[in-house]
Amino acid sequence: MYLRIAEGLLAEGVETISSRKLAQMLGLTDGLVRADLVYFGAFGRPGVGYRVAHLVEELRRIVGIDQVWPVALVGCGSVGRALLAYEGLRKRSFDIVAVFDSDPAKIGRSAGNCRVQDTADLGRELTQRGIRMAILAVPSGAAQPLAEQLAAAGVVGIMNFAPVRIKLPPEVVVMNVDLTLILERLSLRLKVTGR
Amino acid sequence: MYLRIAEGLLAEGVETISSRKLAQMLGLTDGLVRADLVYFGAFGRPGVGYRVAHLVEELRRIVGIDQVWPVALVGCGSVGRALLAYEGLRKRSFDIVAVFDSDPAKIGRSAGNCRVQDTADLGRELTQRGIRMAILAVPSGAAQPLAEQLAAAGVVGIMNFAPVRIKLPPEVVVMNVDLTLILERLSLRLKVTGR
DNA sequence: CGATGTGAATCGTTTCACAGCC
DNA sequence: GGCTGTGAAACGATTCACATCG
């Protein structure tokens, strides 16, 4: 979020920003903003604030999006297609460079810039091309075995849309995007706050 | 997550479960599980554990999914269509009962069980039907004004897919689903853990 | 004896207050 | 005078230890 805000400021031509203003924009306290930025290694100047350009550069490097991540998309259903259609990914340095599906009707068709490949070829293809990040957008039942294949092929980060907790060795980072869970959290928040 | 696990156990026919086993399944400690469940009001029996059926019933009520939430979908692009295609929503007591878009080419077409309506009619329609939850799946630029219309129409909970922080009075709960932010978090985790 | 609910200890995070720099 | 970086205090959350119940 710091990076997002900083990029917005850079685009507006703001040269320098104080922790107080950053905090306002993020809904945080100024002390916390300073503590967080110091954690990444103190870029600010007393009396001045943070140089926006410098902040963006450092944070992009720290987040790891100072270069493009090639990403494999596994599953070309409605979620997969929504991701392929989303130009925001490339803008933010994630590039879907391979697409897999197990449905023979889909294999060979074009998807974004790619041709859909058979999931049977997943391991070989990813290993060969050194792809280390994947998006898993398949039905619940298929998620665990495919995740294991991804891990075996050298993938270290997975964004998982299936509503199941995937079990993998801890060196593989899995981020879950469970839409119904999010709606349930929304419902819970509404209940707890009495709406 | 407690509810998810409990429902899984119920489906498997498990009658009773201990905090230790729940903790294992969730990747937590048994003490934390007990603390969390006590927070919602202590359903367990010493020496026995928690009755799964009771747990499910209570948690569904607490989360607020003991009845169906009618939900409005605003934006019928690729994300909107992916949500309409996702039968998991209805299974978990969220029902998309109204769909809106501003594109004349889409208005009047069918989407799921609905006909796409003009966003111009959004306020009237939602107020009239008492719809209080909405999914906002529109381009960044359109999100803020539409969110304001939703709030004005009595919506108290919004799931927002646009990569912008929506500003609304605090009585409206907004949950953001920002896919590139999630990929960036994944990238950061990989960097921080040295992969 | 197994497992809960609970209060005390522990841990990490956020806030606060301020010395020091621009 | 404004604003950062920093150590100490405050806070909240998790863990621990145990009295208690089935």
Image (spheres, coloured by chain):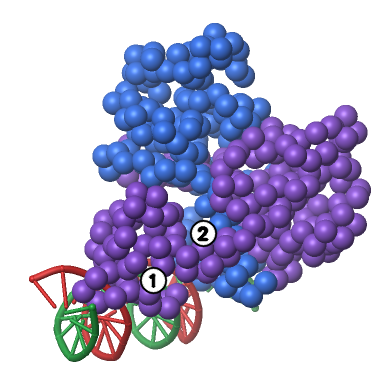
Chain colours: A purple, B blue, C green, D red
Q: Nearer the viewer, residue A172 or D1?
A: D1
Q: Is residue A166 left or right of residue A60?
A: right
Q: Is residue B51 above or below residue A184?
A: below
Circle 2 chain: B
- The image position of residue B30, as x and y in percent, is 56, 69
| Quarter of image, res B88 | top right
Tag 1: amino acid: Asp
Q: What label does residue A36 carry, if any?
A: 1
Label 2 sits on a secondary structure element that is loop
* In the rendered image, residues at marks 1 and 2 fall on the same chain: no
Picture coordinates of residue A75, whole percent (x, y)? 76, 41
Instruction: Look at mark 2 in the image and give the residue it sits on.
Output: B44
Q: Nearer the viewer, residue B32 or A71?
A: A71
Left or right for B25, reference A124:
left
Q: Position of residue B109 (x, y in %)?
A: 59, 11
Q: Tell me what residue is drawn at x 84 percent, y 32 percent.
A: A109
Residue A149 visible to an observer of this rendering: no
Q: Chain of mark 1?
A: A
Quarter occupied by the C terminus of chain B: bottom right
Q: Residue furthest top?
A: B108
Amino acid carrying label 2: it is Gly
Can residue A66 be seen?
A: yes
Which marked residue is nearer to the observer: mark 1 or mark 2? 1
